[in-house]
Image (tube, rainbow, N blue to C red):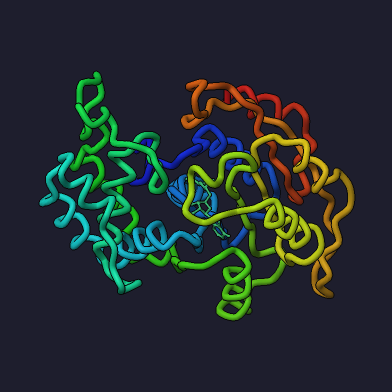
Amino acid sequence: MRYLSPLRYPGAKSGLVNCIRDLIIGNVKKPKLFIEPFAGGAATTLRLLADGVVPRAVIADADPLVATFWKVAATRTEWLIDRMASEPVTLDRWDYWRSYRTESADDPELAVKCLFLNRTTFSGILHGRAGPIGGRKQESAYSLDCRFNKEALSERIRFVGDLFRTGRLVAVWHSEWRATFKLFAEQFPEYGPDDVLVYLDPPYVNKADRLYSTAFASFDHVQLAAHLNHFLPYRWILSYDDHADIRLLYQNGRVQPRNAKAPHWRIQRRFVQLRYSASGRNGRGRKSELIITTLPRFPDQEIFRSVSDECH
Ligand SMILES: C[S@@+](CC[C@H](N)C(=O)[O-])C[C@H]1O[C@@H](n2cnc3c(N)ncnc32)[C@H](O)[C@@H]1O
């Protein structure tokens, strides 16, 4: 399967998946476990698991819709597939799901809401003011259901269930990134600093409020940087939209997690050119993406140049 995720994600950088994969393969030691704390469509985790680049993974997201989707896809796979198959893809249902609210955080219908809105809303945006694909009059060349191929989606959802059943997707959490790291340390104490690799794809610096339900303010970006620069005891790869403030937060140089067990790791930054799927009013655009990492073998310029070209 070329695309593995059942969710389209606003700003999903599918081109980056190959960069991340090559970056990991280019490093000698294969991580035993991969964590994606800002999972969204989890495209990177699914690809790395599918290709056997990492053997096990944990995904988490602060958005209850997204987290419920992954939990239900993992644990109630056939229920979700049947439920999706019986769901008419119409404007009436779009309005229904847009206004659907529930008291129960475990309501599996939230997974259907997430999938439905994600596949039928402009740019896959789940929240805010984004409208249905094709508009309210459905007069455009794109119809509401043009991204709702139930057969293909069933296959992708089944793949998620299969990963969970076979112990490759080991946990799905509804948690904010700080809680994810805390939970991980509590539940997986056997994993040491060199066993784990964390991939972080946090909300955009400029557009987070329009794309995601969870507000991610400047302060959050600063706190995340402080945590990565000084505390996280695992190696990490971070992708960001290229922004001057972010460059300031992550300087090339030494990083020193304040954890007695962790060695000193050096931070490295590289730029990748990518096409964005949700670049707002200006339509599709080519933008520079920043990759920052503590992986040791990143500076191989030749490897990176060819990786970078692939991503254009
Ligand atoms: C850029 S998207 C990730 C896209 C993902 N890499 C993909 O390929 O689909 C950022 C995600 O972070 C989540 N998020 C926002 N604030 C968060 C927080 N404080 N902790 C954890 N997740 C958060 C959003 O719900 C969103 O799913």
Q: Nearer the viewer, residue 69 or 292?
A: 69
The quarter of the picture where residue 188 lies is: bottom right
* Residue 69 placement (x, y as % from top left): 34, 59
Q: Is residue 271 above or below residue 70?
A: above
In the picture provided, is 246 more to the left or to the right than 124? right
* Residue 251 placement (x, y as % from top left): 85, 45
Q: Is residue 303 above or below residue 82?
A: above
* Residue 243 placement (x, y as % from top left): 72, 36
Is any part of residue 59 visible from this angle? Answer: no
Q: Residue at x 30, y 41 (%)?
A: 119
* Residue 176 placement (x, y as % from top left): 56, 65
The quarter of the picture where residue 25 lies is: top right
Q: Nearer the viewer, residue 213 or 69?
A: 213
Q: Nearer the viewer, residue 204 or 297?
A: 204
Q: Residue at x 57, y 40 (%)?
A: 207
Q: Residue at x 78, y 48 (%)?
A: 296
Q: Residue at x 54, y 49 (%)?
A: 53
Which residue extends farthest right? 253
Q: Is residue 182 above or below residue 110?
A: below
Is any part of residue 185 visible from this angle? Answer: yes
Q: Quadrant of the C terminus?
A: top right
In the picture provided, is 64 more to the left or to the right than 258? left
In the picture provided, is 299 more to the left or to the right than 183? right
